[in-house]
Amino acid sequence: MAEDFYWQAKRLEEMSLQEWERLCDGCGKCCLEKLENPDTGELAFTNVACRFLDLETCRCAHYDERLRYALDCVPLAHDNVGELRWMPSTCAYRLLAEGKDLPDWHPLKTGDSASVARAGQSVRGRAISEKLVGDLEDHIVDWSA
Ligand code: SF4
Ligand code: SF4
């Protein structure tokens, strides 16, 4: 019989804080800026990262205090992740909220955090800090959705 992993056995709201945090694959895609067309609501994704994203580790440099530093940072929770349509389609939280499994390259499956970059899912080497960017429209990409 196939092994039952905690992310398959538990609902998001049943997970401990540690289990919840381990779901994050560290891709960094949710920390890239998005543009929303005010008329259509259509979203465009960019390769421009929040100024607090560490572009080497692809982790937030101020994770515990991020809501003090970045006023537009939206904390993820089990009761809002299903509504955040700008979350990337590969995000573990979004996938589980949609009743799907984690991808084969997820570190919880591979046991190796480097598997995210190997699968082409990390922003490492592809993102640029918002501190260096003028017009976001010049940085629209199709890989971070
Ligand atoms: S998109 Fe999801 S899995 Fe990737 S860094 Fe953000 S929260 Fe973590
Ligand atoms: S404050 Fe941190 S978690 Fe929030 S968007 Fe910026 S880098 Fe990401």
Image: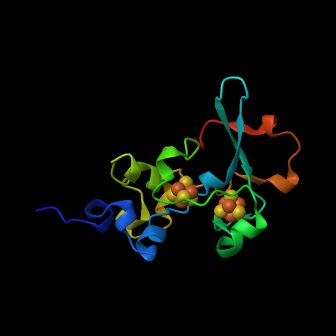
- Which residue is found at the position 70% from the left and 68% from the top? 66
Q: Which residue lies furthest to the front in this view?
A: 79
- Which residue is found at the position 64% from the left and 58% from the top? 124
Q: In the figure, is residue 29 to the left or right of 52?
A: left
Q: Which residue lies furthest to the top in this view?
A: 39
- Which residue is found at the position 86% from the left and 56% from the top? 131
- Which residue is found at the position 49% from the left and 43% from the top? 89
The picture places residue 129, in percent across and down from the top left corner, at 79, 55
Q: Residue furthest left?
A: 1
Quadrant of residue 139 within the rendered picture:
top right
The picture places residue 127, in percent across and down from the top left corner, at 71, 52
Classify the position of the C terminus by image quarter.
top right
Q: In the image, ligand 1 is in what quadrant?
A: bottom right
Residue 63 to residue 45: above or below: below
The picture places residue 8, in percent across and down from the top left corner, at 28, 60
Classify the position of the N terminus by image quarter.
bottom left
Residue 33 to residue 117: above or below: above
Q: Is residue 112 visible?
A: no
